[in-house]
Image (cartoon, helix red, strand yellow):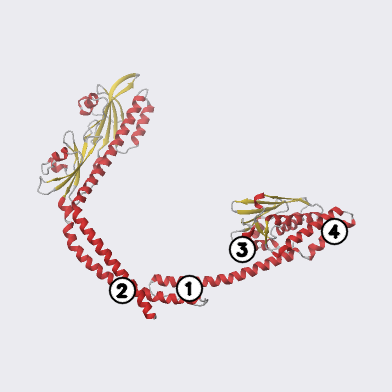
């Protein structure tokens, strides 16, 4: 039976892996081959066109950004009161600094005289800018922004940058008078050169830029060969079309010509790729596909057999171990054999069993501790010393005919015991806990002959939430014994309850002697105990809160010598029914 089950798992794994893998391999291989063979040429056209479109888009954005910068400078100059002001120079210099490829900015009047230039560089002697094509073009078409072909900058001494010039006629204020002139911005052509040079269309393909108006080549990666007559480009084909990809058979090799027009400058981006490069993979795919298909099928069959056999055996062993634990045998452990994942699963299973046993022991211990602390707290509230002192005070008041005070003290004592002993519950409403604290304070106030005053403040929304019983009174007693009683001044104790987010916060503050910084650190760390008081102690309160709510909650002390002490209790806001259910372990 066991052998049959083992073979069944192995059989399912092996057959499933083999059939699924072979099916996927065959289908994918067939589809890929068919699609690749029928669309290789189409993809070559598309890829070439997309690359050309990307180059065109980048160049168009670059030219547009340069035009925007030029228009911004143009607008700034026309709106300026006078072109000779220092503030205008600073504004224009700041605008130029926003682009790293700006070379120079020059402003000429209609006679060709330099009015302003940035940066301040010496111009060539006897330079006649009126004969420059960009100058005449700007004056002939006043509202048109002219963009020149790439050329060597020839305005300044010892400046031989390869630039593109942007020029436009402008009306400006110079020496208080409006005059006509030409604004010239030279931009480094290297940016356009780099954008085009980074493009690759196969191993032999490339991109070049053509001026559609004159048919001149603006950029070409092999421009020197063209100038030397060693290479020719079929620019006529590119000039005929604005957009698209076409076949060029004028040379020995069939080429794919992709064209895109840059509208804002009148240039064309032309991509040249070789068709034989794009189509060579079809024959190679035909040979390698069949070989790859056979190799993959053999590998899948072999691996499926090995993997299924190694996985099935340790899984069955782990299943048997789990069945034993299911029947209550927590001493059973899983043997880690087989692949890494199965061994890790067995290790985690063993850790889980150990954690379950540890938690079971911890639950028993915590329940015993919780009951012990609760019993100690109840016993400490009924200690003979407190009861003797209270009854002795009653006797003295009777002898002094203080019937009203006697009634008050006995009533408070009865309410104190009613809440302390009532119904045997360890969780009560916050309103009842505050009532217990109030009765305790009334008794102690009468015993200490009004040595201190007190107040209890609580938000109405917090009163109906649940709290552990007898956590406020030990803190009040601690404040009386250690803070108020040793002090020569009249004391004051304030109890305040509020809702802080999802938590209940109870503050017990006194104006007693306070604590030193060293002792405060010890108390917050839980390293100090006291023999005075009822014997319950603040550490007892701390432990009960953490046992019930968790280690994140409990007490926090703040104190200064001669200033007093504040104890903050924090625990989660919980409805009374929910807290009673937790107490019962539900």
Residue 333 appears in the figure: no
Q: Is residue 369 left or right of residue 105?
A: right
Q: Which-is-in-front pick, marks 2 and 4?
A: 2
Give the SS element for disc 1: helix
Q: Would you identify the image quadrant in which residue 433 lies?
A: bottom right
Disc 1 to disc 3: CB gap under 8 Å: no
Q: Is residue 63 above or below residue 298?
A: above
Find the distance from the CA under tag 1 to the CA under tag 3.
29 Å
Q: Which-is-in-front pick, marks 1 and 2?
A: 2
Give the SS element for disc 2: helix
Q: Is residue 204 above or below residue 28?
A: above
Residue linked to disc 3? 582
Find the distance from the CA under tag 2 to the CA under tag 4.
92 Å
Q: Would you identify the image quadrant in which residue 100 lies?
A: top left
Q: Is residue 194 left or right of residue 383?
A: left
Residue linked to disc 2? 305
Q: Which-is-in-front pick, marks 3 and 4?
A: 3
Residue linked to disc 4? 394
Sequence order check, earlier mark of 2 and 4 = 2
The residue shown at (16%, 38%) is 239
Find the distance from the CA under tag 3 to the CA under tag 4.
41 Å
Q: Is residue 419 left or right of residue 406?
A: left
């Amino acid at each position: 039976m066991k052998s049959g089950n083992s073979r069944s798992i192995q059989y399912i794994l092996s057959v499933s892996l083999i059939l699924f893998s072979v099916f996927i391999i065959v289908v994918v291989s067939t589809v890929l081959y068919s699609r690749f063979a029928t669309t290789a040429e189409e993809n070559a056209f598309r890829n070439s066109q997309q690359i050309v479109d990307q180059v065109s888009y980048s160049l168009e954005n670059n030219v547009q950004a340069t035009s925007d910068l030029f228009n911004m400078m143009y607008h700034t100059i026309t709106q300026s009161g006078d072109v000779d002001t220092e503030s205008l120079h600073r504004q224009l210099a700041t605008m130029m600094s926003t682009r790293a490829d700006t070379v120079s900015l020059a402003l000429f009047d209609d006679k060709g005289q330099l009015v302003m230039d940035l940066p301040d560089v010496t111009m060539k002697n006897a330079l006649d800018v009126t004969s420059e094509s960009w100058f005449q073009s700007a004056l002939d078409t006043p509202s048109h922004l002219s963009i020149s072909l790439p050329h060597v900058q020839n305005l300044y001494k010892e400046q031989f940058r390869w630039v593109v010039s942007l020029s436009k006629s402008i009306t400006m204020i110079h020496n208080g008078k409006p005059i006509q002139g030409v604004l010239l911005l030279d931009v480094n052509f290297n940016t356009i050169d780099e954008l085009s040079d980074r493009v690759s269309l196969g191993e032999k393909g490339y991109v070049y830029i053509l001026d559609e108006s004159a048919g001149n080549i603006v950029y070409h990666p092999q421009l020197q060969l063209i100038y030397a007559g060693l290479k020719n480009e079929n620019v006529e084909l590119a000039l005929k079309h604005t957009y698209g990809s076409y076949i060029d058979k004028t040379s020995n090799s069939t080429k794919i010509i992709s064209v895109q027009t840059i509208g804002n400058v009148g240039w064309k981006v032309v991509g040249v790729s070789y068709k034989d490069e794009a189509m060579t993979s079809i024959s190679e795919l035909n040979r390698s596909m069949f070989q790859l298909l056979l190799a993959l099928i053999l590998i899948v069959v072999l691996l499926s057999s090995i993997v299924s056999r190694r996985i099935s055996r340790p899984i069955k062993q782990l299943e048997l171990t789990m069945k034993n634990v299911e029947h209550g045998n927590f001493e059973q452990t899983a043997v880690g054999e087989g692949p890494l994942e199965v061994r890790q699963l067995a290790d985690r299973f063993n850790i889980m069993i150990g954690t379950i046993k540890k938690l079971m022991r911890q639950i028993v211990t915590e329940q015993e501790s919780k009951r012990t602390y609760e019993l100690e707290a109840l016993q400490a509230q009924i200690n003979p010393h407190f009861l003797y002192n209270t009854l002795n005070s009653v006797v003295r008041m009777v002898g002094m005919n203080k019937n009203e005070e006697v009634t008050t003290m006995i009533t408070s004592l009865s309410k104190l015991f009613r809440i302390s002993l009532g119904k045997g519950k360890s969780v009560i409403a916050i309103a009842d806990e505050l009532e217990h604290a109030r009765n305790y304070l009334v008794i102690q106030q009468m015993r200490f002959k009004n040595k201190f005053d007190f107040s209890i403040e609580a938000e109405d929304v917090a009163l109906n939430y649940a709290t552990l019983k007898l956590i406020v009174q030990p803190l009040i007693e601690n404040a009386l014994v250690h803070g108020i009683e040793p002090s020569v001044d009249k004391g004051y104790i304030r109890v305040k309850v509020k809702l802080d987010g999802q938590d209940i916060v109870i503050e017990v503050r006194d104006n007693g002697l306070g604590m030193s910084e060293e002792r405060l650190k010890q108390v917050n760390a839980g390293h100090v105990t006291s023999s005075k008081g009822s014997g319950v102690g603040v550490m007892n309160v701390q432990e009960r809160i953490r046992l019930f709510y968790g280690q994140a909650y409990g007490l926090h002390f703040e104190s200064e010598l001669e200033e007093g002490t504040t104890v903050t209790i924090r625990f989660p806001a919980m409805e009374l029914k929910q807290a009673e259910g937790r107490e019962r372990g539900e």
